Amino acid sequence: EVLREHKKWVESQGKVGARGTLAGSDMSSVDLHGENFDAVDFTKAKLSRAILTDCSFVLAILTGVDLSGTDASRAKLMGANLSDANLAKARLSGADLSAKDIVAANGAVRKWPTNLTNANLSYAFLSGANLRQANLMGASLVGADLSGADLRDADLTAAKIEHAEKKSLLEMAKEMQEAIDRVRQRKDKALEKGKGTVARAVSHALGYRHIDTGAMYRRSEEHTSELQSHHDLVCRLLL
């Protein structure tokens, strides 16, 4: 009943129904796979060891929630407030904890970061998770698996990351160094062929799409040469 009224509240933008609140509730070890909890208030609720795979918690209030040992793989948590939450040993592989785009009444778009300040993520599984622009100030990531996680623009001020698995960062550094070494080995053609190699390695390591502008330029040059040849042939025929 709470979730039905909450759904009405969300769909009507607060005009009917009521915002769902499960604050203080105990749902430990409950299977909630795939449920939608967007904007629901879970303040200080108990969800330890719960099954939350593929659930949606966009803009949800999860302040002080016990999520220890829970499986929230692939969950959507964009813009959620997880400050002081306990996520020790939680599975968040592939979860999205990036900032949420909020559109104001005047049409302006602002980023609403996921709030993980002082959260306990010790020994959590965050492989492949999206933490871009997340607020991790004072959070504990001790022993956490961050392999393949996107931490671009995340605020890690005073965060504890001792013994965190940073294999992805080491792989990134290795790939970049190998690319640089390949460029140095081709001293005679470094300017001609080295840039693309480095660009591909860097874009792959940082998760950006690589656009080969060199190939585009060369193709345009070939096209120009073809047009010039056709132009010269037409001129000779006319003469």
Image (cartoon, grey):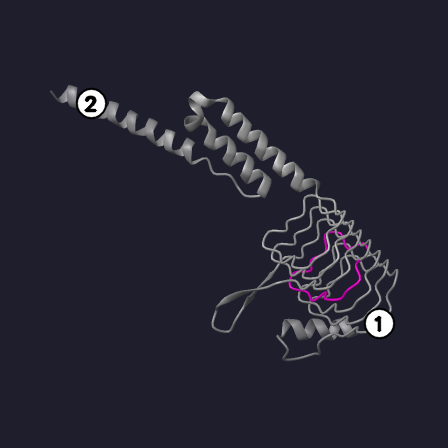
- Considering the numbered disc 1 on the image, is that residue within a helix, a strand or a loop? loop
Residue 193 picture location, percent across and down: 45, 26
Three-letter amino acid code at disc 1?
Answer: Ser
Label 1 to label 2: alpha-carbon separation: 81 Å
Residue lying furthest left: 239
Which residue does the image show at 69% across and 46% down from the upper left? 128
Q: Which of marks 1 and 2 is nearer the N terminus?
A: 1
Indicate yes or no whether the magenta region holds residue 64.
Answer: no
Q: Quadrant of the N terminus?
A: bottom right
Residue 194 picture location, percent across and down: 47, 29
Closest to the observer, 15 or 107: 107
Q: Dot 2, crowdedness within 10 Å: few (<14), some or many (≥20)? A: few
Three-letter amino acid code at disc 2?
Answer: Asp
Q: Which of marks 1 and 2 is in front?
A: 1
Q: Quadrant of the C terminus?
A: top left
**170 shown above or below 132:** above
Q: Dot 1, crowdedness within 10 Å: few (<14), some or many (≥20)? A: some
- Considering the numbered disc 2 on the image, is that residue within a helix, a strand or a loop? helix
Q: Which mark is residue 232?
A: 2
Q: Residue 25 carries which label?
A: 1
Q: In this view, does 177 lie to the left or right of 92?
A: left
Asked where in the image residue 204 lies, by quadrant, the reply is top right
Q: Is residue 58 left or right of residue 125?
A: left
Which residue does the image show at 45% across and 22% down from the upper left? 187
Residue range of the region highlighted in magenta in the rendering = 71-87
Tally of marks: 2
